[in-house]
Amino acid sequence: MQLKDKVAIVTGAKQGIGLGIAMALAKEGCNVVISDIEQAGCETAAAEVEKLGVKTLAVACDVSQKKAVDNLIAKTVKKFGKLDILVNNAGIFPFVPFVDMKEGDWDKVLDVNLKSIFLCSQAAVKEMKSGGKIVSISSIASLVGFEGLVHYCASKGGVNGMTRALALELAGKKINVNAVAPGAIETPGATGAMTADMKKGTVASIPWKRMGTPDDIAQAVVFLASDKADYITGQILAVDGGWTSR
């Protein structure tokens, strides 16, 4: 897929979908910058990815803060001399009933899930050349509603709108901008607190009759980050086992 020796940043990459994406990119020969909220987790994940024979860099970053994001981009360019791919994966999804939702709850989710994509993408674009790829992780919660996640659904709807608009602005620079919208994925954050009955009910809603895996999402990201997706931009790709097709 012509990803060998490319340089990619993956945010929220210490575990779950983010780590799966980092591993999948590395398997294609891509050098990967592992970013997450704390350094120890980044370093552990980077060591795992490095076993695949690529170069890595671990950078702790609060993606909702401009100074931290600028530092992430600067360290990437200092080490590798370039930036080819940005995967905006960092996100949070705290369940809060709407009537109990505090302004701080709303602000935190929008800052981490949406403002971060503005900050990271803007900083990355200044370093990217023609052929650069931006892939953001949206959610099927941008397409259908989920109780207790009004702020999350709103943030992911914003990701979709931003993806389409930014794709138009960056078309002249030949930088592709797309998003992947995962369905129910087996990750520590998403399914760790699920009971067996809750998981059974979720699987029953999925035409494919199984939960997705981080690698299901990672393979879609690898495709959109590759030269095979050069004529695809401004798209939201649902990877959900058919959930949103009902």
Image (spheres, grey):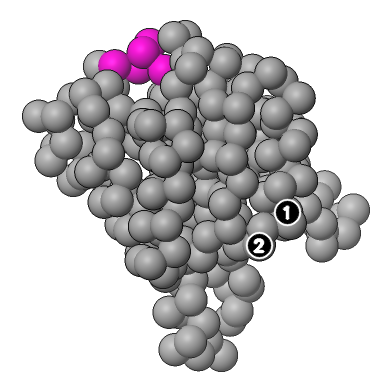
Is there CB contact under 8 Å for labels 2 and 1?
yes
Q: Residue at x 57, y 15 (%)?
A: 28
Tell me which amino acid carries mark 2: Glu
Question: For the point 75% across and 37% down, which residue is it?
Answer: 47
Q: Position of residue 54 (x, y in %)?
A: 63, 22
- What amino acid is at disc 1? Gly
Judge whether residue 229 is colored magenta: yes
Start and end of the magenta stretch?
Answer: 226-230
Considering depth in this image, is 108 or 208 the residue closer to the camera? 108
Circle 2 SS class: loop
**Which residue is at a point 32% across and 44% down the rendered structure image?**
124
Instruction: Kindly identify which residue carries mark 2.
Output: 38
Q: Is the residue marked by circle 2 packed among few (<14), some (14-19), or many (20+) residues within 10 Å?
A: some
Q: Is residue 213 in view from this perspective?
A: no
Q: Residues within 10 Å of mark 1 (few under 14, many from 20)?
A: some
- Farthest right residue? 196
Q: Which residue is denoted by mark 1 in the rendering? A: 41
